[in-house]
Image (tube, rainbow, N blue to C red):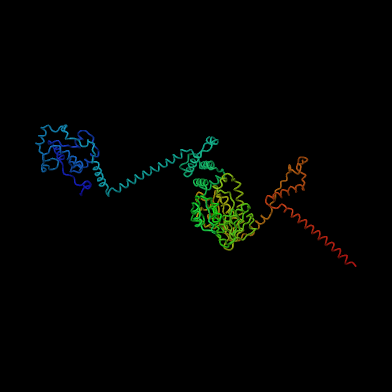
Amino acid sequence: MGTGNRLKHQGIPEPLSEAHFAKLKRKAGLPVDDVPETKKRKAQNGKPSSKSNNKANGKANGKSNGTKVTKPLPPQNGKAAKSKSKKSKPEPELDLDDMSDGVGGGFSDDDMSDLGEEGGLGDDFLGSDDSVYDSEGEGESRAIFSEDEDDSEGDAEERLTAANIVGLSRKLDEERAEEEAADKAELQETLQTNIDIPHVLEDGTEEQNKLLLAPDLQLLRQRISDTIRVLDDFANLSEPGTSRSEYTAQLLKDICAYYGYSEFLAEKLLGLFPPREALAFFDANETPRPIVIRTNTLRTSRRELASALINRGVTLEPVGKWSKVGLQIFESNVPLGATPEYLAGHYILQAASSFLPCMALAPQEGERILDMASAPGGKATYLAAMMKNMGCIFANDPSKARSRALIGNVHRLGVRNVIVCNYDARDFPKVMGGFDRVLLDAPCTGTGVIAKDPSVKTNKTEKDFITIPHTQKQLLLGAIDSVNHTGTGGYVVYSTCSVSVEENEMVVQYALKKRPNVRLVSTDIPFGKEGFTAYQGKTFDKSLSLTRRFYPHTLNMDGFFVAKFHKIGPTPANLVKDRAERTSRPQEEVIDKTPISGDDKTPVQEVEGGEFGGFDDEEDTEYIQRAKRNAMRKRGLDPKALEKPKAQDKAKKDSSRGKAKGKATNGGKLKTKTKP
């Protein structure tokens, strides 16, 4: 065997001391002068000894040849023994040849008998001599601990062999697996405990009591979070005997109370997302969107504009890699609507979501573009900048008041290829057609811009989600009929600032059904979520996955929807005819023929017999004409137009009568001339 681990750590042991020979004599029963012995004396006197010393002694004795020969003390203990042994008398030298086995086998029986005659060694053979004492009783530091550590390390190295390393690693793996299983069980128990602590579902008595008190927003928020956590893992975290609909109803009620939505709108928005994503959507609507400006590339570049605004103390950065003209404003020391750059037309305040329809339309230079609802002019001027003031853009808006802002922005931004008009966009195919591209940013309920207009939370009813989509369908059909399918164009972009399915996917599906000559194409926008192809049991065309949805909680911009159509052929004649007849035919006016109970000009007349009857047609026509004139004034039309057909009829009748009289007189004259 090679050198032991102990010699490697401690080096060669010191030579045997006098205390060692004294131990050998005591074992042999020979008389020994007083020599301090620490460990044995301590054990015999009944004093407790440390476990580390016993282990060290046991290991040392175990390495000998089966005999009880103590190992040499370490250097520290050896020095202490030498210093203390100087006080004792010098011992006679022993002949090492007589010690054959190192235990004292060379001593004879006579020596042992002499020892017996002297009475042997008593229990108190140490006496009260001060030269014999226990070195460990002084409270000194013991180096035996470092010795024990060295021995334990050596034993561990000897035990860790190639034979048992596989077993030890397997044991460690099993222990690790048990710890992981215990951690998972503790985590599940903690989650279950956290769910059980707040009572999610309310009782009837609690609900009645809380009707009289203001809601505690902190408790509502905590209950909303707990309810969503239960819905995420309903099988494990739900209370026994409850259904998922109960938790959904409780979540809906808490959202209405916490965020201030009407129950109708909250339910509609909650059905668009999973519960956790719906909570993120509601939270995003409570924070305003960042201010974004669009650089007018007709007058400056984005780099020059950014440097000019930074010099004025504006903190900004590009809105994203997807736009080359947008700048996002974080902080400004000056009002952004009154800077010299703004007044010079270098930029316009425009939401980032308004860039998307223009990017999807992608107009080309020299084309004829129609913007059906263009006020206040952000998208129309962006299209002009993309076309570099070439081509022609018809910016239409049905509102005269909003058209003023449109005209102001067109002049301020230096746009020269825009024609502003004021028509009902549904009549535009009759007014003018043959456009290469049409942009329709349709009016909507505004469920995507709740952060700008919080009144949407409460003022939108079920009626709004019926009438507004109906108008959007008419506008989209008008846009499709206004575009020309030949040439480089033939594209229609439909967009809304709403996230409801009724105003987006359902309108697009209606257009695909009514106009078989169009199909959906990619919007070429590199981000956003795909449109719904199925919603609450309703299935849509698979091509609706090409549409794009944008949410405030994912992109930090207003909620938006964009769809792009491509017209591949002319609209069928029967569809155009039906539409023309429907638009040209005047709507039948509903006339209430019940008796008028009172009027300032006409006295109230009682009907004999208590029954209706005896209508005066001339008087009724007067009331009807008055109502028509009032209705025309409200629409901004000239009420005298009603009298023009009558004047024309009278003129025609007079002219026809005059012609008849003239013919009669001419015929009489001719007859008289022919007579001889």
Q: Is residue 268 left or right of residue 151?
A: right
Most distant residue in the left direction: 110
The number of discs equals 0
Q: Is residue 543 left or right of residue 608?
A: left
Q: Quadrant of the C terminus?
A: bottom right
Above or below 459: residue 408:
below
Above or below 401: residue 364:
below
Note whether residue 280 is visible: yes
The residue nearer to you, when weighing 278 against 331, is: 331
The location of residue 127, given as percent across then percent down, is 16, 32
Above or below 296: residue 32:
above
Q: Is residue 83 left or right of residue 566?
A: left
Residue at (47% x, 45% y) in the render = 232
Most distant residue in the right direction: 676
Residue at (44% x, 40% y) in the render = 192
Most distant residue in the bottom direction: 676
Above or below 571: residue 266:
above
* Residue 421 occupies quadrant: bottom right
Residue at (23% x, 38% y) in the render = 140
The location of residue 20, given as percent across then percent down, is 16, 40
The location of residue 438, given as percent across then percent down, is 59, 58
The location of residue 476, given as percent across then percent down, is 60, 55
The residue nearer to you, when weighing 513 against 434, is: 434
The residue nearer to you, when weighing 375 against 407, is: 407
Q: Is residue 162 left or right of residue 567?
A: left
